[in-house]
Image (cartoon, coloured by chain):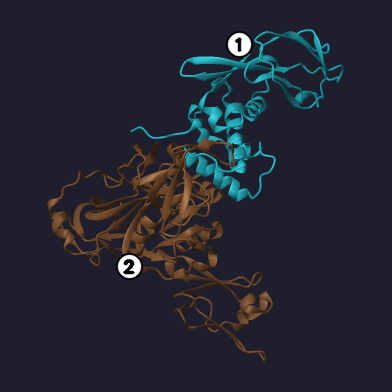
Amino acid sequence: MNANFRVRILENQFVHIRRVLPGSGKLKAVVNQEVMPDDIIGSYTLDAGYSSVNLRRELGVAAPEGIKYLQVPLGRFIYKGELLAYKKSIFGDKVITAPTDGLIEEYNPKTGDLRLKFLSKELPMTSGVFGIVDGIDQRNGEVLVRTIATKVYGVIGSGRERGGILHLIGNSSNLVSGIEIKEDMHRQIIVTGALIYGEALRKAAVIGVSGIISGGLNLSDYLSIVATLDPHDKLGTDVGISLMATEGFGLIPIGEDIFNLIKSFNGKFVFVNGNLNLLLLPAATSSSILAVRKATLPILPLSKSPIIKPELRIVDLNLGDLVRIIWPPFMGAQGKIIAIDKSTSMLESGISTYLVAVQTQKKMIKVPFPNLEVLSSHP
Amino acid sequence: MPRLSGVFDIFADLERIPISDIASWLKQRGDLHTLQNSIGNRLLYPQVVPLTKEDLNIDLAILREAVFRQPEKIYSPKEQKIVIPENFLTRFPPLINLVIALLQALNPQGITTLNIKNIGVTKLIGSSVAPPFNGVVDNLSLEVNGTNIGQLKPGGVMLFPYKDKHLRIKIGQSLEGIAPGGDLGLIIDLRKWA
């Protein structure tokens, strides 16, 4: 009785991570420099963008009247939290504060929209990892850092490599809607649980979330990003956000093996490469630099990522194997094989097959053997 | 590196088939997201077996669309022959439902033999007979080896479990010929007569 063996986690691998300036700027790192996560290796200017406040809606006035309530005139700068508009009312005063630093650029008397232009800011880019700089590309604003990281492989994804602070929104079986995606998740890599809805994905992209890790994705949302299920066609897709699903399509909790690992990296700097279905969890201890010094890695052109994914291979199913269930119900559940039937059973579908008893943390489940993948073999 | 795969492996570029084309074969589609995700997971995990009848129906829909797009994988119109890979039998039970699904995808006309192939050995299991429809529903009486079996009902697919390898059949004035029976038997396909 055979099953596919899938590599999901590879611990302590020497890898190159790429740090890319998000805007125009200058790199300060030099080749062979040893870096720590907070070391500034470059700086960049965050280009101006826009935000808008609808005074008609917020103040409850006719759109052409809205401008009367502005407390700072058009063309002036305002800082986050300052009083922007005010209306006295017998039912309670209406107070609007500036949502961000910016220039009060324009008011639309037809819609009531007040447009604020963000101020350009110079921001630092940190290394994010303990490592050694192996390459610099000033023209593309890229730094290649050799480090040690744990590789976590998902099954589907999209987007180039992006880094950010890992932010767990909830537990492994959470469903995430737009309301849970907040402005402060900008440039973070968020872990959503079992599913992130399409509207939340779109909101995350607008906010500038760097990456999303989820157990499952709805196929329709996935196709709206990658356009095809053909892995050869989708290689290299990027819509400004990187995402990876660890289990498959639909509502599927992140597997215990991956979730337990990810939890310990909450708040740390990590990288996700959706096109490779890969999450990189860099070692968070300074002693890792000792091992990094001794390691050598081939230096590839900075703008190219090596496409190396562990392949599935066939193994025998044995008692004690750690397995993962890959079909509903209980898709994504993990456990150990405690028994293998010696005769076939007829499923409701009419198919006859051998059943395997899998002991999960919560219960024992009988599963047709083809619906299992092996995560680690029992010797 | 070798990996376990599934019955759909004989079809190329299954990933490129629009989900809506697969869904069009299903009578009951249920929740669209659930259906789409199920089809997506089938492509990710081709080796799994369906537990429920609903799962099996989705697999049969994928099979129909794959056969519709790549009929040459199992059908030779020149030889009027359908050759079913043996692993389909255990994966899409019962056999009659599998054969009907294939006929729906292929729509072969006239007499077509039905065969099962396993590692180079092909076994005849019966035939499908679809009399040409000329636009008028006339006499549809079935005769087998000179015996009048009765009137056939237009619009459906009927199975007659004949084992003989040479059956002389006649359907009204529409079709006359030799059709083999076998372990499955003789299938009369009158869907076009509805």
Q: In this view, does B74 lie to the left or right of A29?
A: right
Please tell me how crowded label 2 is: few (under 14), some (14-19), or many (20+) other residues with Cα within 10 Å: some
The quarter of the rendered structure image containing the C terminus of chain A is top left
Distance Cα–Cα, label 2 vs label 1:
72 Å
Residue A318 coordinates in the image, percent (x, y) = 35, 42
Which residue shows up at 54% across the image and 30% down it?
Answer: B90
Mark 2 — on which chain does it sit? A
Which residue shows up at 61% across the image and 70% down it?
Answer: A108
Q: How many marks?
A: 2
Q: Residue tagged by mark 2?
A: A123
Residue A280 coordinates in the image, percent (x, y) = 31, 54
Residue A361 coordinates in the image, percent (x, y) = 41, 59
Please tell me how crowded label 1 is: few (under 14), some (14-19), or many (20+) other residues with Cα within 10 Å: few
Question: In the picture, which chain is cyan?
Answer: B
Residue B110 figure quarter: top right
Residue nearest the observer in this picture, B54 or B131: B54
Residue B171 coordinates in the image, percent (x, y) = 80, 14
Residue nearest the observer in this picture, B79 or A59: B79
Q: What residue type is labelled 1?
A: Glu
Question: In the picture, which chain is brown?
Answer: A
Which residue shows up at 39% across the image and 66% down it?
Answer: A167
Is A301 above or below relative to A177?
A: above
Q: Nearer the viewer, mark 2 or mark 1?
A: 1
The quarter of the rendered structure image containing the N terminus of chain A is top left
Q: Residue tagged by mark 1?
A: B79
Q: Are marks 2 and 1 on the same chain?
A: no
**Disc number at residue B124?**
none
